[in-house]
Amino acid sequence: MPIENSKIELLQEAFLRFNAVSLDLERSYKSMEDQVQQLKLELEKSSAENDALREKAERNLRLAAVGEMAARMAHELRNPLGSIELFAGLLKQNLADVPEKQQWAVHISSAVSSMDYALTNLLLFTGKPLPSFKYHDLPRVIEEARIFSLPLLIQNNIQVNIEMEKIIKPVICDESLLKQVFLNLIINAVDAMPNGGMLNITGEPRVIHSSEKVKIEISDTGTGISEKIRSRIFDPFFTTKNKGTGLGLSIVHNAIQAHEGSIEVNSSKNKGTTFTIMLPFKTGNGGQIINKRTEGIFDEEHS
C-alpha cells in the first residue's frame, strides 16, 4: 500500500507540474499572440501612413500643376481687366451729366475690383512671394484697405468704425501683403452681414512677456461662425459660401505667420465674429528692408 500511495503522490505532483507548465505555456502563447497582433497593427498603420504620404505627394503635385496654370491665367486676365478699369473710369467722367448711366460705369469698376481681389488671392496662394519688410504706418495700411472696399461696404449698407489712434509707432511689415490681409477680413465681414451692420476695427500697443506688440481687432455684427466649422476656416479651399474660392482666410492666416504674428477667432452664432491679430512691432533690424523667403508659407499644409 505505501508503494501505491507513493505512486499516486508522484502522479499528483506530475499532474500539478503539468498544469503549471500548461498555464505558463498558455500565458506565453497569449503574450506572443498579443505581440503578433500589435506588430500587425503597427505594420497596417505604417502601410496606411505610407499610402497617405504617397497620396499627399501626388495631390501636391496635382495642386502645383493646377497652381502654375492658375497663376498664368491670373496674369493673363489682369491685362484686359486693367483696360476695362481704364475705360470704365473714362465713361464715368464723360457721363457726369447723366447720373443714371454714370452708375453703370461705377458698377463696372466695382466688378473689376472684385475680380482683381480674387486674382490677387489666387496669385498669393499659388505663388511663392518674397515679402519686403520695412517700417510702415499701420493705420494708413488699414485705411487704404477700407477705401478699396468702400463700394462694397456702401452697397451692403455696412458702417465702419476705425480706432487706430493709439498706434503711433510704425510696424515692420510687407505693406501689400498686410493690405491684402485686412481686405480679406473686411470682405469676409461683409459676407457675414447680408442685411447690413457694423464693422469695428481697433488697434492698440501691448507688451507681452517684455515684447512690444500691436493688437488689432476686426469685429462684425454678422451671422457668426458655428463651432462645428470654426477650426476649419483657415484651411485652403474651405468655404460655406455659394461663391468664392475659400482662399481668403487661408491667405490671412499664412500672411500673419509670415509676419511672425498670430491670429485668433472668437465667434458665436448670430452674435458676430471677432478676429484678433497680434503683430510684433519689430521683426528685423533698424529701418532696413528685410527680404524673407516664404517657401512653404502658401503651400497646402500650414501650421
Image: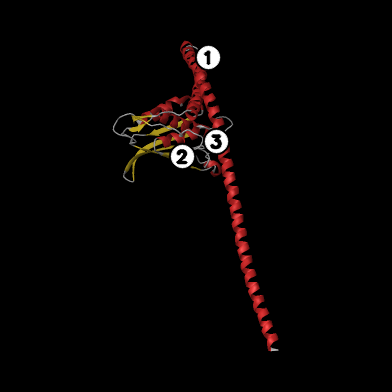
- Mark 1 crowd level (few <14, some 14–19, many ≥20, 10 Å Cα): few
Q: Which mark is residue 57?
A: 3
Asked if the residue under mark 3 is in contact with the one under mark 1, i.e. CB atoms within 8 Å, the reply is no
Could you tell me the amino acid type at mark 2? Answer: Thr
How far apart marks 3 and 2 lie (CA) works out to 35 Å
As drawn, is 193 to the left or to the right of 278? Answer: right
Q: Residue at x 53, y 21 (%)?
A: 73
Q: Which mark is residue 101?
A: 1
Point out residue 126 in the picture as x, y percentages from the top left corner: 50, 28
Point out residue 84 in the picture as x, y percentages from the top left corner: 50, 15
Could you tell me the amino acid type at mark 1? Answer: Lys
User: Considering only vertical position in the picture, is 47 above or below 239?
Assistant: below
Looking at the picture, tell me which residue is in the foreground, 129 or 146. 129
Kind of element beneath mark 1: helix
Kind of element beneath mark 3: helix
Could you tell me the amino acid type at mark 3? Answer: Ala
Q: Residue at x 42, y 25 (%)?
A: 147
In this view, the mark in front (1 or 3): 3
How far apart marks 1 and 3 lie (CA) works out to 53 Å
Looking at the picture, tell me which residue is in the foreground, 190 or 78. 78
If you read the primary sequence from the N terminus, does the residue marked by circle 1 or circle 3 appear first? 3
Q: Residue at x 34, y 33 (%)?
A: 172
User: Considering only vertical position in the picture, is 159 above or below 31?
Assistant: above
Whether residue 238 is visible, yes or no, is: no
Q: Which residue is mark 2?
A: 274
In this view, the mark in front (1 or 2): 2
Quarter of the image for the N terminus: give it: bottom right
- Mark 3 crowd level (few <14, some 14–19, many ≥20, 10 Å Cα): few
